[in-house]
Image: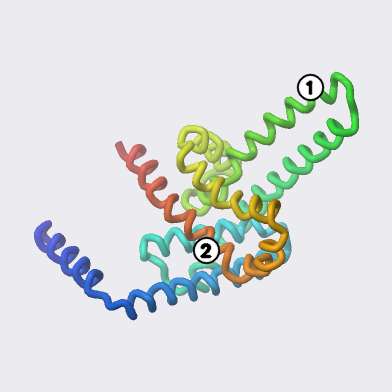
């Protein structure tokens, strides 16, 4: 097919998009929300064993990335396929994260319970560990959803890419940190919305992240291609 024909098809599709009625646009939004609702239910179910939370996030990012690109198929099939293919590595990364967090928690407890030179030095260590985790964590499961790599490289790359792409990292961090900040300052918000995370909010937040992540992936892949 020639370039002129491709451009003609793209133009026709664009015109069809513009010709959508308000009712059709509303239906598309409603359909998207329906997909996100079922995606969130699958996510919640697969998080029940606790150790599979990392795998569940990986599978959800896999699906939302495709939804952003309009490449998504049946939500159930896409989700469980991604969940199965990333099961072991998702569990391993999540367990490493939990061990890391537990280590920081014990170190912090020592710092607040003691007033000596060791606690002062340990406070610096904990601060550095916290910032490393804050940079690395937001991109771990999105990278696992997109690329095949060793567990160590996924974790290291998430840290390096976050540091070298602060704009993308900040958007991810802000999106997930915002609700926790709201909950901290407003108990009523937490009381009225906590259950929505198990129904639809987690998928919505992941989808919003994917809107920023898809151009980020394309930028990385274009650099590698060059």
Residue extending farthest bottom: 23
Write the residue at 58% across / 62% down: 202
Which quadrant: the C terminus? top left
C-alpha gap between disc 2 and disc 1:
41 Å
**Disc 2 target residue:** 204
Residue 185 in the image, given as x and y percentages of width and height:
69, 52
Near mark 1 (Cα within 10 A), the count class, few <14, some 14-19 or many ≥20, is few
Colouring scheme, one of rainbow, by chain, secondary structure, one colour = rainbow
Direction from residue 200 to residue 120 in the image, left or right: right
Vertically, is 162 above or below 6?
Answer: above
How many numbered discs, if any?
2
Label 2 CA crowd tier, 10 Å (few <14, some 14–19, many 20+)? some
Residue 197, given in percent of the width and then of the height, sits at 63, 65
Classify 105 as above or below 60. Answer: above
Quarter of the figure that contains the N terminus: bottom left
Residue 16, located in which quarter of the rendered image? bottom left
- Farthest top residue in view: 117
Q: Identify the residue shown where x is 47% and y is 52%.
A: 146
Q: Position of residue 166 (x, y in %)?
A: 48, 36
**Secondary element type, mark 1:** helix
Q: Position of residue 223 (x, y in %)?
A: 34, 37
Residue found 23% across the figure and 69% down from its top: 18
Residues 164 and 127: in front is 127
Contact, mark 2 vs mark 1 (Cβ under 8 Å)? no
Q: Residue at x 38, y 78 (%)?
A: 27
- Residue nearer the viewer, 218 or 80: 218
When asked about the image quadrant of residue 150, the answer is: top right
Classify 218 as above or below 68: above
Q: Which of the marked residues, 2 or 1, is nearer the chain's N terminus?
A: 1
**Tag 2 secondary structure:** helix
Q: Which mark is residue 121?
A: 1
């Amino acid at each position: 097919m020639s370039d002129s024909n491709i451009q003609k098809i793209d133009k026709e599709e664009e015109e069809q998009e513009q010709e959508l009625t308000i009712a059709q646009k509303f239906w598309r939004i409603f359909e998207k929300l329906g997909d996100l609702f079922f995606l969130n239910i699958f996510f919640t179910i697969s998080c029940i064993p606790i150790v599979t939370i990392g795998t569940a996030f990986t599978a959800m990012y896999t699906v939302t990335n495709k939804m952003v690109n309009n490449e998504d198929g049946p939500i159930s099939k896409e989700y469980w396929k991604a969940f199965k293919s990333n099961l072991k590595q998702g569990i391993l990364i999540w367990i490493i994260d939990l061990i890391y967090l537990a280590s920081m928690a014990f170190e912090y407890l020592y710092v607040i319970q003691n007033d000596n030179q060791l606690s002062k030095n340990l406070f610096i260590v904990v601060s550095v560990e916290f910032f490393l985790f804050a940079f690395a964590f937001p991109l771990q499961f999105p990278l696992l959803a997109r690329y095949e790599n060793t567990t160590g490289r996924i974790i290291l790359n998430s840290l390096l890419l976050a540091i070298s792409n602060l704009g993308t990292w900040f958007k991810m961090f802000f999106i997930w940190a915002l609700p926790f900040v709201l909950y901290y300052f407003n108990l009523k918000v937490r009381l009225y919305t906590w259950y929505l995370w198990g129904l639809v909010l987690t998928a919505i937040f992941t989808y919003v992240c994917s809107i920023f992540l898809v151009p980020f992936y394309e930028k990385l892949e274009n650099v590698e291609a060059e």
